[in-house]
Image (spheres, rainbow, N blue to C red):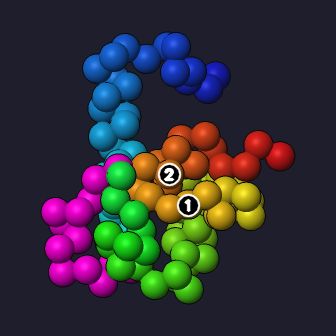
Amino acid sequence: MPALNAEDLSAEDKASTKDELFTKVVEILSPYVTSEDAPANFKEDATLLGDLLINSARLIDIVLDFESEFDIAIDDDQLASLRTVGDAINIVRQGGSSS
């Protein structure tokens, strides 16, 4: 079965896929969040370390969870750019590293 390209999706399908991806990313991040206000803070521009109070040492665990769940590889440059929920979504959407 050929891979599905973004051009093949309708606007409704793209929105659904984006919502599903957001939900899955939030699901993966949730166990690492120490902010009591986290449910209200789960927005694409929420910072992992600042808004969600995720311990920076746990970022490696989060990356490993993303790699396992989405069957991707995330390189050091992408890890360094992982600052917000939206960054996480974009890395996953891009399929991890291109190499």
Task: Give the residue at x 58% y 68%.
Answer: 63
Residue 4 at x, y = what percent? 55, 23
| 4 lies above or below 53 | above
> For mark 2, does the 10 Å Cα neighbourhood hold few (<14), some (14 to 19), or many (20 or more) residues?
some
Which residue is rendered at x = 16% and y = 63% of the image?
Answer: 40
Q: Is residue 46 visible?
A: yes
In the image: residue 42, left or right of residue 49:
left
Mark 2 element type: helix
Number of the label disc, if any, that sits on residue 82: 1
The residue sitting at 44% across, 58% down in the picture is 84
- Report the Cα–Cα distance between label 1 and label 2: 5 Å
Mark identifier at residue 87: 2
Q: Amino acid at mark 1?
A: Leu
Question: Residue 19 in the image: x percent, y percent?
Answer: 30, 40
x and y percentages locating residue 65 in the rendered image = 53, 69
Q: Are marks 1 and 2 in contact (CB under 8 Å)?
A: yes
Q: Which residues are magenta?
A: 31-44
